[in-house]
Amino acid sequence: MSNSRIEMDMGAVISSDEIKLILDRYRIGKKPLAKLLGWGETTIIRYMEGDVPTNEYSNKLRTILDDPEFYYDLLCRRQECLTGVAFKKSKNAVLSKIMSSKIYAVAYYIVNKSCAEISPSYIQYLLYYAQAFSLALYDKELFQEEYGINNEHMPYLKMYESMKKCGIRTLEGCEEYLNREEIELLNTVIDCFLWYGPSALYAMMETERFAMKISRDRYNNRIIAKDIIKGYFKEALNQYQISGIKDIRKYPERKLLEIKGCIKG
């Protein structure tokens, strides 16, 4: 094996500082983390003292470091490996980390309302319409993420891929990160759009996408900026006589009829 290959492999191995970050971020001890992973009790201790993890173990630890949802899923599945106190402490820490991004609080509120009987793609549609009506009705974003243009046609691709990988499960505590106005809006969007199948919502979203200008973010990714979404749905409020959240139901009703060609736009 060449020296450059050896350096590359060594560089990919998780460091003791990164392992310490896992312990601090998720408020879990060395032995409890090892138990959670099904490893020997002293495995993490040895890594912290200088032993080098295998690639397999290193990759697992790096996934935990980079993906709080993966860790939360592991924590819940292996709960019996920890004491009640250790489990609760780590659970609170990882939930706080996940919910630090507002889009996750919104998404998991939707998941909880549906009792996890919802697909990752359908969550994307509801996220988009919740964001759109927040921008149009309240002149403020519900979450920070931009609508991304990609081959999967999923506006919030990172979340979509994460939910596909980890699966859909309820996540308690997300309501604490939402105010009353946001919860009221989300309940209305869920009630108004959940009647329609994924094909209908996909068709509606694609029709809207073609009518909106695509731009680039600072990383040169193709997006539909929030101001563009806001402008489009501001016009929709006037067109469909939507004066508040109680009227949101008019939008999918009329828009889908237009798409089907039953009435003129």
Image (cartoon, rainbow, N blue to C red):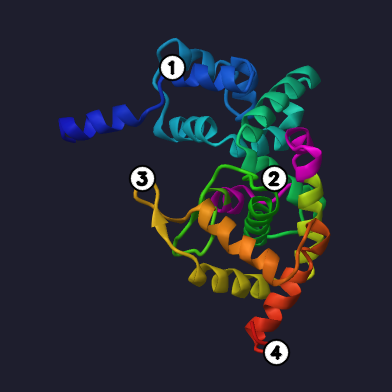
Q: Is residue 200 magenta?
A: no
Q: Is residue 99 above or below residue 223?
A: above
Q: Nearer the viewer, residue 38 or 30?
A: 30
Q: Residue 116, image x and y in percent?
A: 76, 53
Distance from Cα at disc 1 to Cα at disc 3 = 31 Å
Q: Which residue is mark 4?
A: 262
Local crowd size for mark 3, using a 10 Å CA cut-off: few (<14), some (14–19), many (≥20): few
Q: Is residue 70 left or right of residue 186?
A: left
For marks 1 and 3, the one nearer the N-term is: 1
Q: Where, quadrant-wise, is the N terminus in this rendering?
A: top left
Q: Residue 195, image x and y in percent?
A: 79, 69
Q: Is residue 174 above or below residue 204?
A: above
Q: Which residue is mark 3?
A: 219
Local crowd size for mark 1, using a 10 Å CA cut-off: few (<14), some (14–19), many (≥20): some
Helix, strand or loop under label 1? helix
For marks 1 and 2, the one nearer the N-term is: 1
Where does the magenta region start and end? 160-182
Distance from Cα at disc 1 to Cα at disc 2 = 34 Å
Q: Which residue shows up at 82% across the image and 61% down it?
A: 191
Residues at discs 2 and 4 in contact (Cβ within 8 Å): no
Residue type beneath disc 1: Ser
Q: Which residue is mark 2?
A: 106
Distance from Cα at disc 2 to Cα at disc 4 = 34 Å
Q: Is residue 180 magenta?
A: yes
Q: Is residue 230 left or right of residue 193?
A: left
